[in-house]
Image: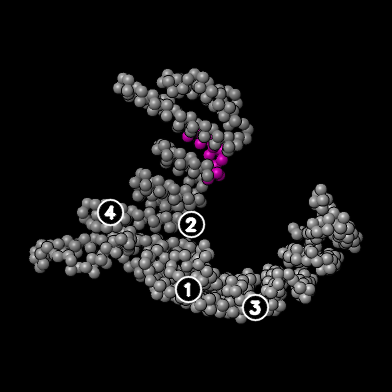
Amino acid sequence: MADVVQYRLERMVDELDDLERRGLFTRREIAEIVKKRRNFEYRLKRPSPLKQDYLAYIEYEKQLDSLRRLRKKSVARQMKEKDNKKLRKSVSDFAGVSRILEIYRLAVMRYKGDIDLWFRYLEFCRERGHGRMKQVLAQVIRFHPKVPGLWIYAAAWEFDHNLNVAAARALMQSGLRACPNSEDLWVEYLRMELTYLNKLKARKAALGEDKGTLTRDNGDAIEKQWRDENKDLFMPLSEGGENADGSSAQEEESEKKEDAFREQGSIILETIYSGAVKALPSNMSLRKRFLEILDATDLAHSDELKEEIMNSMTRDFSKDTDYWDWLARLQINDIRNSKDISKEVVFRQLNKAVEVYEEALKVVASARMFSLYTKFLMDVIVPEREDSIDSWFPSTSDHAAEYISNLLKVYEKAESMECLTEDLAYQYISFYLQLGKLGEARKLAEKLCNEKLPGAVKLWVLRVSIEIKWARRKSASLSKEDLLSVYELLRNVLTKVAISEAESLWLMAIKLFSNHKDYFDKLVQISLILLAKGGDDSESKFSLSSAIVNWVVQRDGILRARDMYKRLVHQKRRMLSIGVPGRRSKTRVDCLLHMIYDGFL
């Protein structure tokens, strides 16, 4: 090891002498550099060097080379001012980059599977414009042919840096053969082909042989519309003359060339799209991205292509709830970036979106579909939400009642079609609370908890809170009748739902009755009965016993807490003695003992 490190250090002698001779570093600084490099070299020669060892060495060399360049500029400026001489390049100008590249090479050979390390290597080669880039790209693709990002990176480098479209196209096609299921590869291949076509068109426009590009520009469309509306202001130079005929002939020829580019772009998109759909028939995101590209470019037959893609998506994804949600929101995306749009247009598009959701419920009536539908309507109704639709279009106050009515009908429909989940029911009741209809929310909560979703803990918590609000309408404190009613409600559900699932309900009950001794003792009795039945799941993160003891400590102090602790521990030991699985349950008791003891301390 020492011989190899010494050999590598001796190879740096010429570089270090050059740095000292030029006055970039002093002898003392060079000695420090040698010391640091020796330490790094020894770390790399260990039996199992870490990735961080290579990265730390590379970072040190980068900072050192950056300092060298700064000092070189200063020395060169002084030489120019003094003798009007230029500082020529020497061995030290290249040694630093070469050393970093060598360390990167050693690192990627040691950690061949680290893609992030390979990309760092590639980025350094690209930033320094080093000729090793093509060699490194070939190496990494040979080691990782199934990583789509590498093919895209290599093709982009050939296309943008080398201006070699043929090589970039060949790399993309090879990547698609190696990774036919990569969505990003298909999309980037299409973008590259359209970008190349757009560059050809732009070059012809610069030469005066053509006009415009394939990219859609809203400004050009507005200017064209203004010219059409005010065509009387524009006077032709010679109406009916020879010049006019010649000009019209040139315009026709230019239009033919422009149509040829648009036609070619359309063919490219259609060809790549058909190949992508064959490779990824069930990928909806791919088709959505193709539509985005189609909307952003000006191609021939774009409307027909768009209609074809939309029809294929309807055919293949009609049972997918995400497709219907995307299709409905697509109705309002067209007006999202528009300025000074009228309320009538906005509400017409919103109604179209609602119609799409209604159609979706006929095709795929599921809880998720109802959830997406209600989220859309909530975005329209509640403008304060961060993701609300109302944040970018005129106020819906004139139509709020209509959308509120629609939302309530959707909830009712979900209930009638047995698609009301716990979360959807929670939103249903909460919406009544947002509307200030406490009575309706109370009746609905009672109905859903007793009939549709009797085991939904989240709904029971909401129902109890609604009952407390209802009891406090006239007085801030609860009467005895109200306390008894709430207790009976909680007792009814706590005896039916497992302790491990009813954590929020138990904590709510303990907190509510912590200052009412009679009811609190009754809750303790219920907990003991449930624990005796084996209701305290040893795998659960929630410990009812611990929660009760903690509340007793806060309310009555340490002496009462000890008594409660003894009762609970006695009950747990009794469970062990009657045959509850031994080791795990005993461990549970021991953990409880330590936890409560630590809490007392």
Q: Secondary structure at mark 1?
A: helix
Residue under numbered circle 2: 182
Please identify, in this view, whether the residue under mark 2 or under mark 4 is nearer the observer.
4
Q: Residues within 10 Å of mark 3 (few under 14, many from 20)?
A: some
Q: Nearer the viewer, residue 322 or 453?
A: 453
* Residue type pointed to by label 3: Gly
From the image, give the main secondary structure of the stretch colored magenta.
helix
Residue under numbered circle 1: 397
Q: Secondary structure at mark 2?
A: loop
Q: Secondary structure at mark 4?
A: helix
Q: Is residue 316 visible?
A: no
* Residue type pointed to by label 2: Ser
Q: Is residue 106 magenta?
A: yes
Q: Position of residue 67 (x, y in %)?
A: 46, 29
Q: Nearer the viewer, residue 99 or 28?
A: 28
* Residue type pointed to by label 4: Ala
- Tell me if 419 is positioned left or right of 569 in this view: left
Residue, x 85% and y 57% (percent of image)? 561
Q: Which mark is residue 439?
A: 3
Marks 2/3: CA distance? 54 Å
Nearer the N terminus, badge 4 or badge 3? 4
